[in-house]
Amino acid sequence: MSDTPAAGGPGTLYCVPTPITADRAPAADLAPEALALVARLDYVVAENAKTARAVLKRFPLERPIQAIEIVELNEHTRDDAIAPMLAPLLAGRSAALMSEAGCPGVADPGARLVLAAHEAGVPVMPIVGPSALLLALMGSGLNGQRFAFAGYLPTGVDERRQRLRDLEQRSRRDDETVLFIETPYRNQAMFDALMATLAPATRLCVAADLTGSKQRLQTRRVADWRRSPVVLDKVPTVFLLLAR
C-alpha cells in the first residue's frame, strides 16, 4: 500500500475507517501499514473537521496537525464543491476520506466523492477497518446471507410505524434481515416504537456502542423484549429485525 502516485498520474483516494466509539484508538482497528499510510498524508476529506482533527491526533503523524489540510464533506455540501475537492487528487496528491465513525461512504456522505473519483479516473483504495453495520450483523445471529440496510427511518410517529410495518413485511416475505439506525438521542423512542409495532415472533437485535465500554448486543423475539424492556443509552446503535 503506497501513497506515491505513478509519474504524472493522479493521487489515490484512500477510504479510511475510524473508530466507531470515542474511547477506542485507531491502532486498535487498523493495521500498522494503514496507520503509517495515513500518517504520511497531508490532505483529508472529512464529515467534520473538528472531529477529524481529534481522531488524527491519535495517529502517528509525520507532520503537525496544523499542516494537514482538512476539507469538510457532509450532508450540507453543495454538488459544485465536489470538483474542487477532487482537484488535488487529479494533480497527483493523495487523500484520506474519513467518516465521523466507521467506514466512509457507508451511510455516509463521502460516497459522493468516491463516485466522482471513479468518474475522473482517480484510484480508490478502501482500507480494512470497523463497520458498525457488519459488526452488528455478525453478532446478531440473524440471516447473514440476505440482508438490507434501510438507513434512518422517519421521525414522525405514524410514518415511523408504517415504515416499520413495511420493513417487517419485507423481511418476512424475503427471509431478509433488515438493518437500520437512529440518532442516538432518539434510540429509546425507536425501541418503544419497535415494541409497539412489531409482531411478537419477530426477532430484534439491539447492537449499541459496538467495541465501546457500554456495548450492548442482544437478539430476542419481540415478545421477550416486551417482558424485559431496556433503557438505551444515547450511543450509536444499530437495530436489526428478522420476521418469520
Image (cartoon, grey):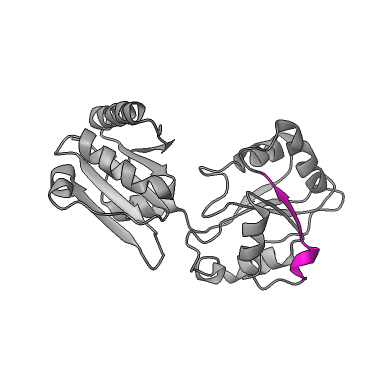
Residue plotted at (40% across, 34% down): 155
Would you say residue 68 sits in the magenta stretch?
yes
Against 104, is 199 above or below?
Answer: above
**Of 120 and 107, the residue lying toward us:** 107
**Relative to 7, is 65 above or below?**
below
Q: In this picture, which residue range is highlighted in magenta?
A: 63-73
In the rendered structure, the answer to whether residue 242 lies left or right of residue 33 reads left
Q: Quadrant of residue 115?
A: top right
Q: Classify residue 50 by image quadrant.
A: bottom right
Point 23% across, 31% down: residue: 172
Query: Is 195 displayed left or right of 152 in the figure?
Result: left
**Residue 239 sits above or below residue 233 on the image:** above
109 vs 118, left or right, is left
Compared across the picture, whether 118 is left or right of 213 comes to right
Placement of the C terminus among the 4 image quadrants: top left
Query: Where 161 sits versus 192, above or below?
Result: above
In the image, residue 184 lies in the stretch drawn in magenta:
no
Image location of residue 83, percent across then percent down: 77, 37
Image quarter where the N terminus lies is bottom right
Task: Give the x, y percent position of residue 45.
Answer: 69, 50
Q: How many marks?
A: 0
Q: Is residue 60 visible?
A: yes
* Residue at 33% across, 42% down: 190
The residue under the point 32% across, 26% down is 158
Q: Position of residue 228 (x, y in %)?
A: 15, 53
Image location of residue 76, percent across then percent down: 64, 37
The answer, for residue 143, to whether it is visible in the render is: no
